[in-house]
Amino acid sequence: MGDLGSRVVMESQEIQRTLERLAGEIFADAVDAARLVLVGIHTGGVYLARRLRDLIYEKFQQKVPVGSLDITLYRDDWTRLHTQPVVKATELPFPIDDREVVLVDDVLYTGRTIRAALDALVDYGRPKRVQVAVLVDRGHRELPICGQFVGIELRTLEDEMVNVLLREKDMTDRVVIAKKIMA
């Protein structure tokens, strides 16, 4: 990302340290670790949820189930975004009733993605508690939603984007702020 309007705010090692911290916070906050599940929001949240699961197992020897959630059709703006939405698989290979669910996403922005995820999640059952874990909170909330587990808080401008690059899809780990390109 060599254009003049972008800047790197996290590199691979910092992302790793941040995920280690988040894994510890999530595990420590669980009322009943045996009831804890991580649900990643497609796409970046799924990769991060899997990494958090692995870190929790490495540090605490606790197996935490991981699921994935597609929120495409639950978004309040999907008709404006795409005429043919690309729907990914929701995989919740465990019941969520009475579970401690941590929704995992890469960036928390307006809060609309988390709202859609909550709507989607309750279609699958009634969790005991739902919390939110994000790598980046960039502010600009439009809804009263917050992250309970936040990797980094960034002050961003409305005309900026936060791009979370993850090795699983981008071959590198990096968080970059870039200017939005106006069409």
Image: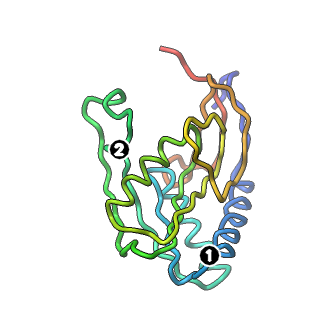
| Identity, as a three-letter code, of the amino acid under mark 1 | Ala
Between marks 2 and 1, how big is the CA–CA gap? 29 Å
Instruction: In this rendered view, identify the residue nearer to me: 42 or 109.
Output: 109
Is residue 40 depicted above or below 106 in this figure? below
In the rendered image, residue 148, in percent from the top left (x then y), is placed at 65, 58
| Identity, as a three-letter code, of the amino acid under mark 2 | Thr
Instruction: In this rendered view, identify the residue nearer to me: 161 or 119.
Output: 119
Residue 6, image quadrant = top right
Residue 33, image quadrant = bottom right
Q: Which residue is mark 1?
A: 30
How many C-alpha atoms fall within 10 Å of the one at disc 2: few (<14), some, or many (≥20)? many
User: If you read the primary sequence from the N terminus, does the residue marked by circle 2 or circle 1 appear first?
Assistant: 1
Classify mark 2: helix, strand or loop: helix
Is residue 139 depicted above or below 127 in this figure? above
Colour basis: rainbow
Residue 67, image quadrant = bottom left
Q: Which residue is mark 2?
A: 72
Report if the CB atoms under discs 2 and 1 are less than 8 Å apart: no
Q: Residue at x 61, y 53 (%)?
A: 134
Q: Residue at x 31, y 56 (%)?
A: 89
